[in-house]
Image (cartoon, rainbow, N blue to C red):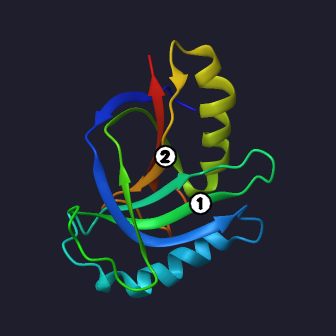
Amino acid sequence: MEEPKITSKPAFTVIGMKYRGKNEHEEIPQLWGRFMEREGEIEDKQNPQVCYGVEDNYNETSGEFDYVAAFEVSSDTDVPEGMVKWDLPAQTYAVFTCTLPTIREAYQYAYKSWLPQSSYQGAEGPEFELYDQDFNPQVPSSKMYIFVPVNK
């Protein structure tokens, strides 16, 4: 794994479909399939070529977490039925580049190797995956980005 880039991102809002669990049976890819069938219902996308997979509310005891497949929207956008709106705070992030086949390895590297050895600490708040216009889920080498909230 390569060293992450450190970047700041202003507060932003996403709307999407939520899953809560451990992803033991590939529920997150299934969520993305259902979400992409309904993505046309989301109005006022800030960039329709960029999707987010936002994770928060991890429970260390159960291993469950919330995951939202989403698009960035303006904060006053209406929420379609069966979807949620999440506001993400302005934050500094360590950004790790990976692919779908290496996503678990990238998270392990971020939290178990890089973070403990860096001059940063993990920060409160959601982490997210960013899938830009160059990402293609059918191409295993297609790059995506993991944004891990950090403080100096």
Secondary structure beneath disc 2? loop
Q: Amino acid at mark 1?
A: Asp
What's the residue at 66%, 48% (across, down)?
Answer: 104
Q: Residues within 10 Å of mark 2 (few under 14, many from 20)?
A: many
The N terminus lies in quadrant? top right
Q: Is 101 or 64 nearer to us in this picture?
A: 64
Q: Position of residue 103 (x, y in %)?
A: 60, 50
Q: Position of residue 126 (x, y in %)?
A: 49, 46
What's the residue at 50%, 30% (across, down)?
Answer: 123
Q: Is residue 1 above or below residue 101?
A: above
Q: Relative to 84, is 76 on the left or the right?
A: left
The C terminus lies in quadrant? top left
Q: Is residue 8 above or below residue 19?
A: above
Question: Quadrant location of residue 65?
Answer: bottom right
Q: Residues within 10 Å of mark 1 (few under 14, many from 20)?
A: some
Residue occupied by mark 1: 66
In 3D space, how far apart are the residues under numbered discs 2 and 1 (Cα atoms)?
10 Å
Secondary structure beneath disc 1? strand
For marks 2 and 1, the one nearer the N-term is: 1
Residue occupied by mark 2: 126
What's the residue at 52%, 81% (across, down)?
Answer: 33
What's the residue at 52%, 45% (across, down)?
Answer: 98
